[in-house]
Amino acid sequence: MILGLCGSPRAKTTEYVLRKALEMLVEQGVETEFYTVRGKNLGFCIHCDHCIKGKGCILQDDMQGLYPLMEEAEGFIIATPVYNGGVSAQTKTVMDRTRALLTADPKAFRGKAGAAIAIWGSQLFIPFFQAADGRAFRPPRMIPVVAWTDIGLICAAFALALILAQTIMLLAALRRGVFQALRMGDRE
Ligand SMILES: Cc1cc2nc3c(=O)[nH]c(=O)nc-3n(C[C@H](O)[C@H](O)[C@H](O)COP(=O)(O)O)c2cc1C
């Protein structure tokens, strides 16, 4: 089983991308599990060293439900939103709290596969407001994606609305004999 861990407190981009990655694994016949920090009660590691004595984590919160999943997993995809250039506090909390697994068994994660997904926002527009020297920050090139289908649908909707409006106007004009009144229609 591959465990997808979402470190975003929202059901937005990070969750979306992680779910897509897990879907791709499922298509390959891989069993997956999705876990999100959203809505969970996850306390910070307090460095009490309770776990070092082999007693597990002293904090009885939602992390207790995640430990068995982490033990069972053969691999992880850790997905995090970028907060101030790093992982989110929620993701870091989960990472810190895995200490309880490693102190119980230092080989707990040995041989397990790992992948990471990081979702950020401002790097897409920071290059346009570059304050530092050009060499200081080189964001990756953006790949332009044009939503042709959506554009097509919008154009079709506008065309349809226009045709409808013109038809209604023409019918109304015909009914009222406007063309005859303006001497644009039949002459008797
Ligand atoms: C506290 C905080 C700090 C952030 N710091 C950064 C940052 O350093 N760089 C960046 O590109 N985006 C930053 N962002 C924007 C998020 O990375 C971006 O909105 C991301 O898509 C959020 O993921 P989500 O939609 O899954 O919640 C920050 C957002 C928050 C709330």
Image (cartoon, rainbow, N blue to C red):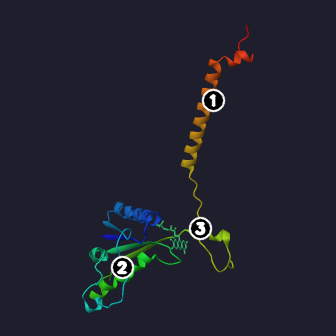
Position of residue 180 relative to residue 80, above or below, is: above
Q: Is mark 3 within 8 Å of ligand 1?
A: yes
Q: Residues within 10 Å of mark 2 (few under 14, many from 20)?
A: some
Is 100 on the left-hand or right-hand side of 126? left
**Mark 2 or 3, nearer chain start:** 2
The amino acid on which the numbered mark 3 sits, given as a three-letter code, is Leu
Amino acid under label 1? Gln
In the picture, the disc for residue 30 is none
In terms of secondary structure, where does tag 2 sit?
A: loop
Which residue is painted at 60% across and 40% down in the image? 158
Outermost residue on the top side: it is 188
Query: Residue 53 location, x and y as percent?
Result: 26, 92
Q: Residue at x 58, y 69 (%)?
A: 122
Place of residue 19 in the rendered image (x, y in percent of width and height, measured from the top left): 40, 63
Residue at mark 1: 166
User: Can you say whether 151 is above or below 42 in the image?
Assistant: above
Residue at image location 64% in from the left, 24% down from the top: 170
Nearer-the-camera pick, 155 or 52: 52
Lower position in the chain sequence, tag 1 or tag 3:
3
> What residue is disc 2 on?
43
Q: Is the shortest distance between ligand 1 and the CB of mark 2 under 8 Å?
A: no
Residue 82, above or below 53: above
